[in-house]
Amino acid sequence: MTVRLLNNHSIIERPGQDELLTIRNDLMTVYREISDGDDADDRLFPLRYARATPRRLPRRRAPGSARTVPDRAQVPLLVIPDGPGMASVLPYDNLRRSLASRGVDVLMMEHRGVGLSRLDSTGADLPVESMRLRNVLGDLVAVLDHARVQQAAVYGTGYGAYLAQALAALHPERVHSLVLDSPLTGADDELAGQQALRDMYWEGNDPTTATTARVLRRLVEGGVVDGHRAGTIVLAVHEYGGPEAVRDLVDLLAMDRGQLTWNSIRQVLAQRWLESTPYVRELDLVAPIAHTELGSGRHADGRPMDSLVLPAEQARAVADFEGEPLDLHDLAGRITAPTLVVSGGRNLLLPPRTARDLARRIPGARLLELPGTGHSVLDSHSQIAQVAARWSVAGAAHLLPDRAAELAELPRTPVNKVLQRGLQLAMAAERFSPWRLRLESARVRREQAQVDPLARRSRRVRLD
């Protein structure tokens, strides 16, 4: 299968990985043991990381002089994206180039089991047994050693923030400063996200979404939408469009429209290509980290608005959760690096209270809350992430909470804008072209009835 990225670079098949490597001039390879620890496998595999170095060093004013001189004291930046199935090399090309153009020396490691770090020296997939957090932490240290970086500013988001915390606590001498974006702090964090979603869109405890929640409950009771699957769909709409988009879609459904948009989102979320896009996102091999060690999906309960349905289904392919190998709540107190914790006010995956609790546990940490953003500022608001990274490299990230209002005005990333606009257009089409789309919705309901003769035909829901 050939995958085409937004920048129109053609991505070749996995057997042609060597050809892909030859056209990259920013890739480094460090040979790592397949597995450390008790089940050590000392065979080596090629772990890849990308490095973008600035052509010119940033400048600073010389003491006692009006002239500027190159700032040679600035440390490199290690960026750890979300995961564990997210690649680093291809999806973040533009980010590295942008930071390098502003004088930052940027490193990004490809997570083991993903993209260009998926294969062993023979060209076969790495063994599933080697997908362990302790090995990934060893990979990070190996990359810093290979790059001859004694200390780095570390920016981690989601799962990447989990790794960044562990690196800072267990190897404090390697971490100059720390930015934790939408941080994962433990296996129970998903419970907070599940409850936050239900509070907003099922219980209606948030005044801004109370009406939406009431209508959504009526839609579920009337059989218009499947309450078991509604959580993942509402979560996706909220992430890209916020409460306004969820309200608009729910209102459409109440008027016997909106089914095409709703079903399209449901079908997209269910597609296997979301789990396996070579060199971009690959969840299959790293599933033991996500589910067996970090417990992703284990709190799914099947009740209405369960946002953990998809992770729970993915978890069936691997061993059950066996307990976290690290206690980050305990380790947080050992972090000595200056730390900035970044939280999106709209984040329902890892909600703000998770970030607030973490900021309280890390000595001297500062909290930057951004009301209009969701999960992973690195992915949704790259300009904000770059400011935080650059200020962290310069040792000034602790000043950013005082500039929160200015940062919140920075635009979304282009891809995020496209997804948001696409959602708006889909709902506008259903709102202003009702007849064609009602016919389409009727067709979908007929197909569902053929599969399940007892399926209830969706009806307009009374709201009084």
Image (tube, helix red, strand yellow):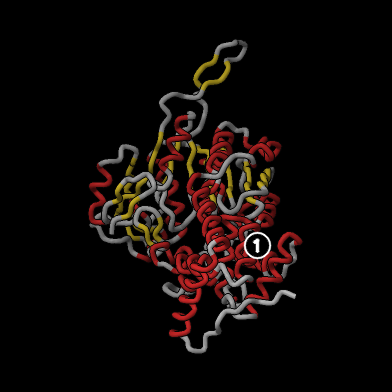
- Farthest bottom residue? 454
Left or right of 224 in this view: 132: left
Residue 125 position in % (x across, y down) = 30, 61
Left or right of 334 in this view: 174: left
Residue occupying the point 75% across, 75% down: 464
Question: Residue 458, can we see it?
Answer: yes
The answer to which of 130 and 302 lies nearer the viewer is 302
- Farthest front residue? 435
**Where 177 sits versus 15, above or below?**
above
Q: Quadrant of the N terminus?
A: bottom left
Residue occupying the point 62% across, 11% down: 64
Structural crowding at the residue carrying mark 1, measured as other residues with C-alpha within 10 Å and reported as few (<14), some (14–19) or many (≥20): many
Q: Which residue is mark 1?
A: 247
Residue occupying the point 57% across, 79% down: 458
Question: Residue 167, can we see it?
Answer: no
Residue 151 position in % (x across, y down) = 50, 37
Kind of residue at disc 1: Arg
The answer to which of 247 and 144 lies nearer the viewer is 247
Residue 222 position in % (x across, y down) = 63, 80
Label 1 element class: helix
Residue occupying the point 69% across, 52% down: 356
